Image (cartoon, coloured by chain):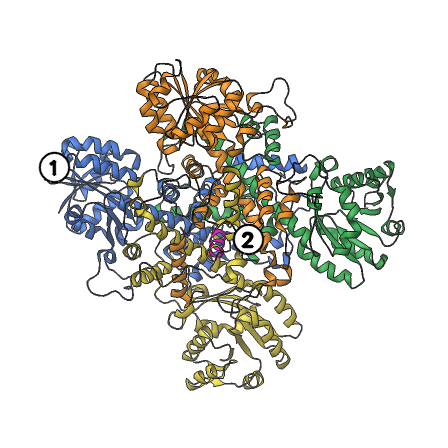
Chain colours: A blue, B yellow, C orange, D green
Amino acid sequence: MQIGMIGLGRMGANMVRRLQRAGHQCVVFDRSSEAVQALAKEGMTPAASVQEFVNKLSAPRAIWLMLPAAVVDASIAELTPLLSADDIIIDGGNSYYKDDIVRAKSLSAQSIHYADVGVSGGTWGLERGYCLMIGAQQHTVARLQPIFAALAPGVGTTPRTEGRSGQPSTAEIGYLHCGPEGAGHFVKMVHNGIEYGMMAAFAEGFNLLRHANVGNMSHGVDAETTPLREPEAFRYDIDVAEVAELWRRGSVVSSWLLDLTAHALQADPNLEGFGGKVSDSGEGRWTSIAAIESGTPAPVLTAALFDRFNSRGEADYGNKLLSALRYEFGGHHEKR
Amino acid sequence: MQIGMIGLGRMGANMVRRLQRAGHQCVVFDRSSEAVQALAKEGMTPAASVQEFVNKLSAPRAIWLMLPAAVVDASIAELTPLLSADDIIIDGGNSYYKDDIVRAKSLSAQSIHYADVGVSGGTWGLERGYCLMIGAQQHTVARLQPIFAALAPGVGTTPRTEGRSGQPSTAEIGYLHCGPEGAGHFVKMVHNGIEYGMMAAFAEGFNLLRHANVGNMSHGVDAETTPLREPEAFRYDIDVAEVAELWRRGSVVSSWLLDLTAHALQADPNLEGFGGKVSDSGEGRWTSIAAIESGTPAPVLTAALFDRFNSRGEADYGNKLLSALRYEFGGHHEKR
Amino acid sequence: MQIGMIGLGRMGANMVRRLQRAGHQCVVFDRSSEAVQALAKEGMTPAASVQEFVNKLSAPRAIWLMLPAAVVDASIAELTPLLSADDIIIDGGNSYYKDDIVRAKSLSAQSIHYADVGVSGGTWGLERGYCLMIGAQQHTVARLQPIFAALAPGVGTTPRTEGRSGQPSTAEIGYLHCGPEGAGHFVKMVHNGIEYGMMAAFAEGFNLLRHANVGNMSHGVDAETTPLREPEAFRYDIDVAEVAELWRRGSVVSSWLLDLTAHALQADPNLEGFGGKVSDSGEGRWTSIAAIESGTPAPVLTAALFDRFNSRGEADYGNKLLSALRYEFGGHHEKR
Amino acid sequence: MQIGMIGLGRMGANMVRRLQRAGHQCVVFDRSSEAVQALAKEGMTPAASVQEFVNKLSAPRAIWLMLPAAVVDASIAELTPLLSADDIIIDGGNSYYKDDIVRAKSLSAQSIHYADVGVSGGTWGLERGYCLMIGAQQHTVARLQPIFAALAPGVGTTPRTEGRSGQPSTAEIGYLHCGPEGAGHFVKMVHNGIEYGMMAAFAEGFNLLRHANVGNMSHGVDAETTPLREPEAFRYDIDVAEVAELWRRGSVVSSWLLDLTAHALQADPNLEGFGGKVSDSGEGRWTSIAAIESGTPAPVLTAALFDRFNSRGEADYGNKLLSALRYEFGGHHEKR
């Protein structure tokens, strides 16, 4: 079928390529004409403006936005006056699901349909396929089904879950209609929240493996340093790259994140190319906020989020206050 | 080669089977003569007593203990008078790595060698192979190499990590000499700590998905209930079994634990067969203790551990105190 | 000066009493005519309707709302058509500070001023005075200064902070202009967030003291129970009521919350009158949300919040999933 | 009565002074002869060696050690050959309570009694008195009662807890026999654990108040920075020193730690004299370890502990791994 794509960055461009390979006709637009030209050379239909983009699509249209969350609303505002009833706008970026609810309501007044699609797959998706979490009305999902099927990984080599039989469900192919508008980004949000927790689990574990030799280090002997009670229990120099490799085989923590850990540590076990200031994106924050708003405990996911803030120095003032209090009540001078 | 196995439970019996398949000669002993007889029927050499077990092994012996951590020391105490210099005792159970350090030192006085082997694989290991984390002196590892190779999963179908070349390392085959005595259980301990964190990440995420419909529930309207500010944002009935299935394909959280989640939820998305009192084993505790002792932050892994305690009612008295304090300062009556 | 009070519950009624004692003239209204009559008998000017209430106040008016957060907007909507330019509406309840920003902006279009006042003091405020955190424009604070001074505790017996000299600041008297509209509830919100953290610290500490005798308990000996390694280290029967009393004198944790703990434990060290389902109110949630939104780590305050959710059973589904996973990978059966 | 004190540092010297003021005869020793001479000038009986110290005390002796935890065992080893049956050794330092259990058992073989006393009071104790948590046999406590009463704050000005009547308990005077040997340090350990949690609550809260103006800051607009959704909600410049002062009056968080916070912020609201590398001492660690060993949830206290480790850079390697993983799966480049 025909589909329009606005936003031809890392994600959008590869998704168009995957759609084209599956035989779909793709009209493409981006603020960067270079990005448009690059895909034109690969056979996609280029558009030089939003107006031209809309014109090149036959109604009822399906328009996929693959844009930074901050500019989605502006893009929709620019598009809508040009659209017709029954057109579909799909936001495949990382929007806050509450924004989807507002947008869907507003667009429905003009009989424009809305779908929010959480997309997982990153830079690997062109080859592996994209895992799609979809929020929309049922009829919208039905119309877009060929697109979703093309983007999704397919049944592939993943072994079937024991107990399942018959035709594979769409989830087994790699896309899922999660519920009405917002549901796709809600599920994607939680996915990323889980990702934060899993990443933190590996980070803490490998960090502890690196600390397994602290008994060999000399420590200050002063009132401000807690001595290691049993230095003989911390004299291991663990080869973390080999451990990551090992755990890829037959262990309970086998996972794609572990595969990536093994790759990163194989290249540089000391990770010297990194400074340790860890970014976070909206989804991690929204997961914790959704947990708080709905009264759901999420201590592990939220601790993982706060540790990212902490890595960027955002706890500094609080830490200074702790040192100040230790000085106040105990005359403790801070270590330098 | 010849190997003796003491402890023929779920793990030990299957490990012996895997060793036999690889051509090793296995002498087996267990307090349960039934367990011994069962393996005798499969061709293993049975022993009716520890003495007979030792006699049937040719020196220098290799004796693998696959026992509950609580009885390992007693078993070693019973064995050692019967052993000769250069025999090896291997503890493949879930011992605390500090115990390994003590045992190795004590056995070395009699020229008996000690190896601690953390084994991951659970009930799946017979077919998938066991991931082995080994602490021992180099010469001990060298002698046991055929055993480790037979138990390990082998290179198998796991794709090779990009950047690696040449002969596979032992980690790529599925076993790793992590360091001197204790190092194997140390690495296994951290492995389980990571497992706790990953499991908690999934548990919190799926729990949040289940709470996505709280806007549809009626809530008490009283001073003790925080009203949901935006009920319209929590009106999703998410099919968690399909979400788990979906994420197995192309998502960042793909993992063996997710495969198991998909299986468990496919069988019963409401998990009604479970009460939610979650056990923990030593390794999870020791990971957090090792983190504290070595001054390594592990907030995520430790929160996961404490939540297990909490699930078993161990926070109750503290919670009562919170309610009591709310009554003290605000006259708040606890909800029933 | 003259002041109107709407909302004569536990807080509002006592605040009016304290204002009257200081010589202020109080016009009072509440949906419950009983509450109005009770204060009328104590000499306050009663109003039978909102209209009468407004009429009995001379312009420019000062109207203090002491209402549940959920009804404040409705009350303001009812009031505003009856008010004149330069009247002041004060929200002394537990509103979300973001609502204050919206209200202030909306009211300013009618030249009505707005103040948000976070009030701490609970049932003790009539005698101890109320600690007031104020968000408003400077001129609004100036007009209300006599009211704030009357409600506040005053310099009282609190020893002056070393290094301060001259006239006491208003903070030393017990009220503070924290910033423009919303700032009062923002500071109150953080106050309550800190309160959650402190309460959790006491709850966890006293719970641990109660667990100091677990070495005397018999524990199950099965694969699902981690044995206590050193039962001899947990054989203390601590008298928690006496410990709370002790710490009130000269210890670092001396605090009003500890005084309340001592009182609660003196009455019943087993806290049998409480079930341990701990409520939370908006402020605790908003503190954590503000932390997340502003990128500020708040792991301790947020863990305290999540533990309240947990106490009400909101982690149950997640816990069931953990048990299900343990069964999946290890064949572990849940303990009953 | 007569008492010997070994260890004349900040704590020991002031405790001796307080004992002397109460009429007790104090024999003093320290490795530093200057410290001994200083107290000799104040009228204490000096000793130039451990032997002389023991000789100057009449049997049965009471010897109080006020030493760094790391040297207590050596000091006891030096003392014991010189002591007689029925002498008492008191460890008033910050020992691990498990060490007390071992020492008491070992000393009892020579009929020497042991008491462990957790002492809170810091540099303020000389004037305020010391809060004493005592672990010992009943008869030992009885003999030392005059010493404990002299060191304790006394009933003082702390208002009596409602519901108590009759003679004040010793807890009301400021000392408590908590249980057999180890119980004193156990209770002191938990006290310090609670202190960590309370301090963290204040640190996080004041840090959040300082972040209340992040809406006024310019933020990077790039894929690695989560934009502030509502900058207008974070435009407050809060005067944290005045807030701390305010909360000292009538608020729920009133506490000695808040008094100290007010003092520290009054001197320098930016806390520029501190770097934010926060030390921790044994008690905080042991509290969390005791919680883990006894299966007691302590997520708040432990998060507070881990944040101290984090403040000293101990999470760095884990953070680098997080950045590395973000690069692996998303091509995200770390912010500098």
Residue C295 shown left or right of residue D55 in the figure: left
Residue D252 shown left or right of residue C288 in the figure: right
Q: Residues within 10 Å of mark 2 (few under 14, many from 20)?
A: many
The residue beneath circle 1 is: A85
Residue A142 shown left or right of residue B65 in the figure: left
In the rendered view of the protein, which quadrant contains the C terminus of chain C? bottom left
Query: Looking at the image, which residue is at 73% across and 55% down?
Result: D136
Find residue C153 and report its horizontal and vertical position in percent: 56, 26
Residue C142 shown left or right of residue A106 in the figure: right
Is B301 rendered above or below residue A55?
below
Instruction: Name the outermost residue toward the front.
Output: C41
Residue type pointed to by label 1: Ala
Q: Main secondary structure of the magenta part?
A: helix
Is C79 rendered above or below residue B58?
above
| SS state under label 1 | loop
Instruction: Name the outermost residue toward the left.
Output: A58
- Answer whether residue D237 is visible to the viewer in this image: no
Q: Is residue A69 magenta?
A: no
Find residue A4 and report its horizontal and vertical position in percent: 17, 41
Query: Gap in Å between the C-alphas at discs 1 and 2?
Result: 60 Å
Find residue D29 and report its horizontal and vertical position in percent: 83, 46
Q: Which residues are magenta?
A: B302-309
The chain holding disc 1 is A
The residue beneath circle 2 is: B291
User: Residue A181 is drawn in which quadrant?
Assistant: top left
Indicate which label's residue lies in the foreground, 1 or 2. 1
Query: Residue A284 shows which numbered tag?
Result: none
Query: Looking at the image, which residue is at 60% across and 43% down?
Result: C262
The chain holding disc 2 is B
